[in-house]
Amino acid sequence: MKRKIILILVLVSLIAGFQSCIKPSFDVELLIGKWSRPSPFASPEYPGDEYYRYDQGGTGASWDTSEDVAEEEGQKFTWNLSGSTLTLFHEIEMGGGVTKIYTLTTLTTDKLIYKDEFGKVYTFQKVQ
């Protein structure tokens, strides 16, 4: 009897342990749209927000109104969401680009939270 209880406890522990290894998956459709957060470069003289627009088909743009950049002038990027991994490839005008990889923690109809490889957390609100 004691052996059965120990075996059951071991099995429950193993199952709970494997559950923590499963990466969450997010609905790509929730990402589509325009997201904003307070600009990290804003000041009283130059207030503004940072924007990311995720379009259908894996394209998008980012811009910062505190740096006097409008949506039409935004930096183009391509994106991919696989499980909880969001990969952005920012295209540089003079050629080449920069890849950024984030881990999503929250994606709802109005909130987007992800972190970078250094643990810095980015929180956005959906504006469109």
Image: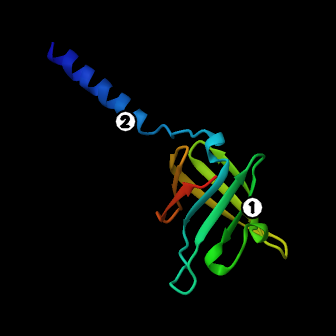
- As drawn, the residue found furthest toward the top would be 1
User: How far from the left and from the top, in percent, is residue 115?
Assistant: 51, 59
In the rendered view, tell whether residue 124 sits above or below residue 73.
above
Rendering quarter of residue 15: top left
- Element assignment for label 2: helix
Rendering quarter of residue 87: bottom right
| Proximity of marks 1 and 2: CB atoms separated by less than 8 Å | no
> Which one is earlier in the sequence, the residue at label 1 or at label 2?
2
User: How far from the left and from the top, in percent, is residue 88?
Assistant: 68, 58
- As drawn, the residue found furthest toward the left would be 2
In this rendered view, identify the residue nearer to me: 83 or 38: 38
In the rendered view, tell whether residue 12 sits above or below residue 73.
above
Mark 2 is surrounded, within 10 Å at the Cα level, by few (under 14), some (14 to 19) or many (20 or more) other residues, namely few
Give the side of residue 58 with respect to residue 117, left or right: right
The quadrant the N terminus occupies is: top left
Looking at the picture, which amino acid does disc 2 mark? Gly
Mark 1 is surrounded, within 10 Å at the Cα level, by few (under 14), some (14 to 19) or many (20 or more) other residues, namely many
Badge nearest the viewer, 1 or 2: 1
Residue at image x 68%, y 79%?
68
In this rendered view, identify the residue nearer to me: 82 or 62: 62
In this rendered view, identify the residue nearer to me: 39 or 121: 39
- Element assignment for label 1: strand
Mark 1 → mark 2, Cα distance in angstroms: 37 Å
Looking at the picture, which amino acid does disc 1 mark? Phe
In this rendered view, identify the residue nearer to me: 112 or 16: 112
Residue at image x 53%, y 56%?
125
Which residue is tagged 1? 77
Residue at image x 53%, y 48%?
110
Which residue is tagged 2? 17
Give the side of residue 31 with respect to residue 55, left or right: left
In the rendered view, tell whether residue 107 sits above or below residue 37.
above
